[in-house]
Amino acid sequence: MKSLHDRALMTKAQHGDLDAFTEMVKRYQGNVRACLAVRLTDSHEAEDLAQEAFIIAYRKRKEFDVEKAFGPWVRTIALNLLRNYWRKHKATSIGGAAELDILMNKHIELNYSADNESERLKALKRCLTKLDESMRMLLRLRYYEQKSIQEMKKAMNVNHSTATMRLHRLREVLHKCIKHQTDSLEV
């Protein structure tokens, strides 16, 4: 029944009824915000992107096919905004994912050799011992076995976004741990 009512509201919105579109925003704003909030660490950014998604949806309301579901359409707009946000706000600071990749590869090459280990590499070694089994499996698949995301998702029996999110979280955990380890040495 909700989709029939959504269809009627969007038809009205397409003909300029602002109240009808406002009702659609009320219905779907929580879903869109949640979709963004789980992918961002800053809740304010999630709010801003959700609001922008509805602004774009309003501007493009006449292009919307009322025979289709509104929720997935507005979430797609929000996820496209999120991709653009990530492109614009790529981390370039030291300690980012690229540097972690280099450290991981260096760590593997040295195979825990005590010779020539930098403090950061020693910190990485300590941090690796703190990982839980699921993170160790992810680490093994990606860095030791050099599996692609496609291969990893099959091995872990998860979808693409789950595999990439887990890999992202692994990198964040290791980055924070290394930073904590090396910061405590400098004090």
Image (cartoon, helix red, strand yellow):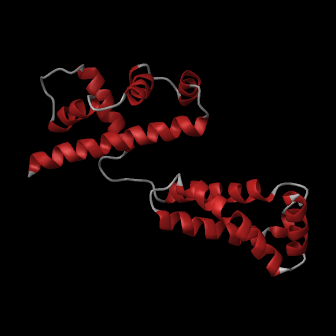
- The number of discs equals 0
At horizontal 59% and vertical 25% (from top left) the residue drawn is: 157
- Relative vertical location of residue 123 with respect to residue 72 in this rendering, above or below: above
- Regarding residue 128, the answer to whether it shows in the image is yes
Q: Residue at x 40, y 53 (%)?
A: 91
Q: Nearer the viewer, residue 20 or 58?
A: 20
**Displayed quadrant of residue 83:** bottom right
Q: Residue at x 18, y 43 (%)?
A: 181
Q: Residue at x 46, y 59 (%)?
A: 89
Q: Is residue 14 above or below residue 179?
A: below
Q: In the image as oriented, which residue stretches furthest toward the front?
A: 1
Q: Position of residue 84 (x, y in %)?
A: 57, 58
Locate residue 122, reporting x and y percent. 18, 32
Q: Nearer the viewer, residue 20 or 108?
A: 20
For the N terminus, the image quarter is: bottom right
Q: Position of residue 94 (x, y in %)?
A: 29, 49
In the displayed image of the protein, which residue is found farthest to the left? 187
Query: Whole-percent x and y of residue 71?
Result: 75, 57
* Near-viewer residue (11 or 93): 11
Q: Does 120 sit left or right of 86 as displayed? A: left
136 with respect to 112 (left or right): right
